[in-house]
Amino acid sequence: MSIYVGDCMPMKIKELLFGPMPKPSVDEYAELDLSQYEEVMEEEPAETYIRVAELNNLDGIPDLKSEIYDGNIVIVDISLIKRDRIVLERALRDLRDVVSDVHGDIAGLGEDLVITTPTGIKIDRSRIGGRTVAY
């Protein structure tokens, strides 16, 4: 399979979404037991999931389309196909078409990531804090 959909968000994606994370000092570190929260999350299925995918070639497009049609938000790492301009343009065109079909949205996050949203979810292209960014 040419697409990777993982459960954890790579550090690069976290930094793009939330900005640089400050490193806690030894005095600020506290051990937290998150097991009680994980149990609650596992019991109830969600209506919308945020999925992370890595696109290696065009064979992964049908899986991405399926995720978008299922109502999920998909963050796609396109860094592996950026070298081939034709493949990149075709993949982005296919993603734009499916997002348009479901009345969702699509935008770039930096140079290597694209986020797609399903029906009813739009991407605000201004940053919190006032600085506007064109994607």
Image: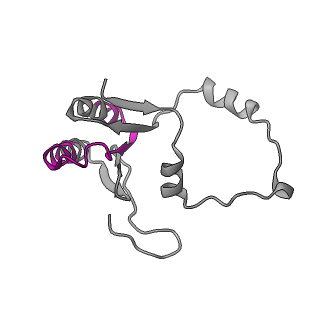
Question: What span is colored magenta in the figure?
Answer: 66-94
| Along the line of sight, the residue nearer the viewer: 36 or 24 | 24
- Location of residue 114 in the rendering, given as x and y in whole percent from the top left corner: 34, 50
| Residue in the image at 23% along x and 48% along y | 83
Snapshot quadrant of residue 119: top left
| Along the line of sight, the residue nearer the viewer: 45 or 9 | 9
Q: Is residue 95 left or right of residue 17?
A: left
| Residue in the image at 22% along x and 29% along y | 59
Q: In this view, does 62 lie to the left or right of 72?
A: left
- Location of residue 57 in the rendering, given as x and y in whole percent from the top left corner: 23, 35
Magenta residue check for 81? yes
Above or below: residue 122 compared with residue 117: below
| Along the line of sight, the residue nearer the viewer: 106 or 10 | 10
| Along the line of sight, the residue nearer the viewer: 56 or 64 | 56
Q: Is residue 97 left or right of residue 80?
A: left
Above or below: residue 44 compared with residue 119: above
Above or below: residue 51 compared with residue 92: above
